[in-house]
Amino acid sequence: MNKKLIYMSLLSATMLLGSCGEDFLEQEPYDAVPVGEAINSPAELQTAVFGMYASLRTADAYGRTIPVLGDLMADNTYVAPLNSGRYLVQNVYRTEAVTGEPREIWTALYASILRANQIINADIPSTPVVEQLKGEAYAVRALAYHELVKFFAQPFTVAPNAPGVPIITEFDPENPTDYYVGSQPSRNSVAEVYELIISDYQTAYELMEGNFVNSSYMNKWAARALQARAYLFMGAYEEAEEAALDVVTNSGFELVELDGFLDYWASRTPSSAKEETLFEISYDDIDNVGTNALANIYNQAGYGDILATEELVSLYGENDIRGIIPNVDDEGARYIVDETDGDTINITAAPVILVGARGNVEPAYINNKYQYVSGDRNEVKVIRYAEVLLILAEAYARTGEEAKALEILNELAEARNAAPLVGLAGDELLEAIIVERRKELAFEGHRFWTLARLNLPIEREPEQPASTALIEVGNFRRIFPIPQAEIDANPNIEQNPGYGL
């Protein structure tokens, strides 16, 4: 492992403050527990947890790159002709081993794993507080490993025995910046990485109590929901159904109400109610990534580089709250027509997708889920209750419970004021679920991974580069290269096919 890269990643993480509730305001800052020291008390464990969350906030991880690429490398978004030069390589599928984004994702996620391992391996007496904090660390470690194996390895559903990523679960305070604890490991298999992911989420679920502080902290139900996601990626549909149904039945989380949906996306505050968001990356006026924030890459007041494809926008019905909402009354107020009873519902907040112009692109379809490019930036959603419902619907459909799948699908459609779906079964039902995933989770970084786990070709849209109109399932560039710095530093780590010198 390239220790210079590691050191810089840790230094960046150490400079960030973790967001916290009022009950933690008197705690020492988390960097009072340096990564190179053992943790000796619950208070030090808490400050280390703040550092772990801070490591997820970087623009190289959930702060921007991970959610952006999940749409850009599929068919939801594209880089406008007038742009600031960001993500051009991924837009044209020309990522190489020396490209910055793979190195930055790799380094950022292994920094999170290092911090999680520091907490998990802390040798302090068990208490409910200690178990809660360690549970959060197990969940974050699983989340980081899932992102790594998604980006750098074959999908589990395609090649479970293919090389995955190195598994590191030990923390050595004598070598704090050495993720590999003095060794040069080879890559574990994809199946081995997923085994750890499932196990870590299960441990997190069992360690954490059901209490919910706010959506900026990992919690029992976020771990269970993320486990359901991992099972879905494995094609383990019965297990995905069980985990998702547990969340739906027992967590107390609910979909945001129709009349609160736009305000939900306009909020810059972690939710302390069990409304929609199970876990998100939180920012505030002081602790944020500035112009590298996710909002800046979409919002025309920022870089505004990335636009939505017309095909994506066309999927939303006229009164779907997730779409453009073109209806305006005589007084200039926006409104939608309730799909269930025909009543008019006034909408005061901005719609999720705006129409405007960008250079020589007109109309330009602009993502407005992330509205704030200064001060307290938007939170970045990692797992929402809507996704849990979509996981459950797909699991039901694939295990022969199609009526239940359709019922779940229509529960979500009704909440978003979309037209109800009737009479669907078999492949038509599965396709409707995949389309609903595309609509509901757009701009949150999921579309590419849906196509990857289902081993489907990527049929890109006319606005995207003509050279990438069709990305076949065997295209080696659908998987990122292991960063060249890692290949150079570790002779035991194998490069992905197609990226050799």
Image (spheres, rainbow, N blue to C red):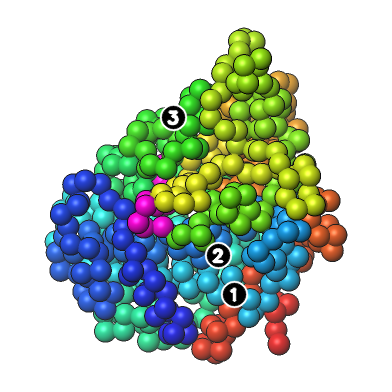
* 286 magenta-colored: yes
Residue position for label 2: 149
The span from disc 1 to disc 2 (Cα, nearest Å) is 18 Å
Residue position for label 3: 254
The span from disc 3 to disc 1 (Cα, nearest Å) is 39 Å
- Range shown magenta: 278-288
The span from disc 2 to disc 3 (Cα, nearest Å) is 30 Å
**Residue 420 x/y as whole percent:** 67, 21
Q: Is residue 463 visible?
A: yes
Q: Amino acid at mark 2?
A: Val
Q: Amino acid at mark 1?
A: Gly
Tell me the residue at 26%/55% (across/down): 133
Earlier sequence position, callout 3 versus callout 1: 1
Looking at the image, which is closer to me, 300 or 244? 300
Q: Are marks 3 and 1 in contact (CB under 8 Å)?
A: no
Q: Is residue 411 visible?
A: no
Tell me the residue at 37%/38% (across/down): 271
Earlier sequence position, callout 2 versus callout 3: 2
Compared to 335, does 122 lie above or below?
A: below
Q: In screen coordinates, is 255 left or right of 477? A: left
For mark 2, does the 10 Å Cα neighbourhood hold few (<14), some (14 to 19), or many (20 or more) residues?
A: many
Earlier sequence position, callout 1 versus callout 2: 1
